[in-house]
Each structure stands twice: as C-alpha cells, then as structure tokens.
Image (spheres, rainbow, N blue to C red):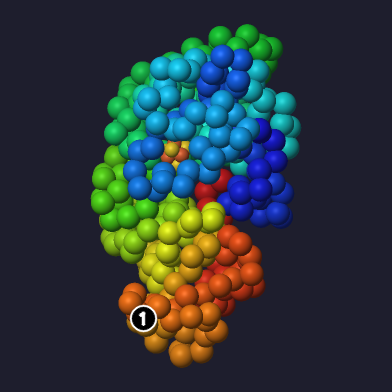
Amino acid sequence: MADKSKIEWLKGPGGELGASWNPIVAYRGRRRGWFCIHASPGCMRCYAEAMNSWRGNELPYRVTSQNKLRIELDEKVLMQPLHWKQSRKIFPCSMTDHLGSWVEDQWIYRMLAIAALTPQHDYLFLTKREKRLAPLFLNMNLRLRVAWEVREFLLGSHVTIQALNRLRNEWPLKNVWLGVSVEDQERADRRREQLELVAKLGWLTWVSYEPALETVDWVGWNFLKWFVWGGESGPRARPFEVGWGWRALDWCRLAGVPCFVKQMGRNVRVSMVTFQRRFGGVMSFNRFDQKAGEFIIKLKNRKGGDPSEWPEGLRVREFPKVQ
Ligand code: SF4
C-alpha cells in the first residue's frame, strides 16, 4: 500500500499517478493493518475500514478496537518518498486520520520532516479532526521540531543541510497542503473555523466535499486554494443530488478557487429545481422518485466517475495554481 494510487485528484496534469503513503500501521498480534475511529457521518462507509477488514488486521474502525492493537510509525514506509525521485502528489495517511488521538505529535513532525526533505512532491493531508489542526500547525515550535526530526534521519549532510535551509527560508512548507473533509453544513461550519486559522498563517489549504451528503453554504471559505467534490461510491452509497455539486462549482467560480469534480457517486439524484434550472428540461433518467421528488440517474461507471457521462458544465477538473 503506497506507490501508485488511482485516486483521481492525486493524478498529475498529464495523468501521472500519485501515491498514498501510510506510515502509521496497527498490529493485532502478527496481523498488520491500519486503525481509525469514525469521526462523523462521512465515515459511515469508510473505504479504508473496508480495506482493513480484508487486507489488514480485520478490526472495525471503532474505539473498542484500539486496546487490541499496537499502533506504530513504520520507519521503512516513512522513508519511501525519499526514494521517489519523480515529483508526485502524495496522500499521507489515506488509511487513517493523521490527526487521530492515537497519532503521536512526533510522528507528524517526522512526516513533515520527510516533506521538507522532498520538495519535489506535494503532500495533501486530509482530516476530519479539525480540533487538532490549529494547536499543532500554529505552534511556534513546530518548525524547530520538524528541523530536529530532519537531523534525526541522519541522511547525507548535503541533503540535510538543503532541507534545513528550506525550513529556514520557506515556512509554512509550500509542498504541504492541509485539508479538511466536509460532508454537510454542520461539519462545514465546524471545520472551516479551524482551517481558516491555519490558512491565515500561510498554510496552503483545501477541502474535500466527499461524500457530499447535503448542500453546503460555502460563504466564508475564500481562503481555500483548492476544492474537490464528489458523491458517495460503494454498494450502499447515500444519495447525491447533482445540484449540491453544481452550487459548489458556482461558488468556486465566484471565489476564484480551482475546482476538481471527482465523481457523481453511485446513488445519483437530480431534483426538480436542478432539472429545470440546469438541464433545460433535457435529461435521460431511469426513474422518478415520487416521494423525494427527484429523478434517479443510473450511470454506467460504478462510481459515476466518467466525465463523459456528466452534463458538460460539470466536466471540470482544475488543479491548484500554487504548486
Ligand atoms: S476519518 Fe477517514 S479513515 Fe477514519 S474512519 Fe473516517 S473516513 Fe475512515
């Protein structure tokens, strides 16, 4: 689990694959896997948890699992980006939440030290635990702690000195992106405040509105440098109303934030309002849900991830201008 991820938003502009990077691992006896705890409604169909159940330690992502596990930072996995010479986008801790209470501060410093040592890569961190963002990333000693960890790697003096110089001249690191995952209005309000605090200090920030579970008012998010959205995928995916994404795209246009439309998801709906305003009355649908007042759309791509099946106005896959 590392090199070459198929996640769409990790791809480079030329379609080059990005990578997920999971140095935080969880052992149950000799069975190695990952660990996390559900944090909000967006976690209900957690992909990482499903993967852990068949390729990992098999324990669900619940509080009760934690005392059956030994959670550690795998130094070998931690070093992987140092060996990836070609620049790529990296999703750190895709199998957990890097701000979970089981993650030690020092592990985060070490991951940031790796980012300082590899300016050729972009690190796209994503969390649902916004409360730990500001205390960690606004801490005046963070740069010093990261510099200390850079030295601890005991790499060649040339590499170390370059990274230390970078930390001296470039803070916050320009290849580290701090993001929050947002699924509904309640989570949006809660996570925006904390993310804005770190953005004010110069950290590059982004949002992943996936799985989108209801429409969200994005007023006040203008500090963002990137916006990604998508409906839920998987067999029991919850409904995604296309108008929610369309409104998010409208907001991105007004705010000048690059927008990346990832997927429509597996349970795609179109409300009467969206139908009249956006589709101009032309649309093929499978069924009309009388009770919800929505059209149900079946797309051939199981994740609704093929842009050729979307309305033309939604075929938007922009990347941030600051790289
Ligand atoms: S925070 Fe992420 S990894 Fe953890 S349970 Fe939720 S969706 Fe899964």
Instruction: Give the total of numbered labels.
Output: 1
- Whether residue 163 is visible here, answered yes or no, is no
Crowd class of label 1 (few under 14; some 14 to 19; many from 20; radius 10 Å):
few
Residue 212 % position (x, y)? 41, 58
The residue at the point 39 percent across, 87 percent down is: 276
Depth check: give the residue in front, 292 or 6.
292
What residue is at 34 percent from the left and 75 percent from the top?
Answer: 292
For the N terminus, the image quarter is top right
Give the image location of residue 201, x and y in percent.
34, 37
Which image quarter has ligand 1? top left
Along the horizontal axis of the image, is 185 left or right of 82? left
Residue at image coords 55%, 18%? 27
The spot of residue 203 in percent (x, y) is: 41, 38
Residue type beneath disc 1: Gln
**Disc 1 target residue:** 290
Q: Is residue 295 above or below residue 227?
A: below
Name of the residue lying farthest toward the bottom = 281
Q: In this view, does 64 lie above or below 237?
A: above
> Image height check: is 246 above or below 81?
below
163 horizontally vs 272: left or right: right
Q: What element carries label 1?
A: loop
Q: Position of residue 264 (x, y in %)?
A: 52, 64
Viewer-proximal residue, 229 or 300?
Answer: 300
Residue 306 visible here = yes
Residue at x 26% of width, y 51% of height: 186
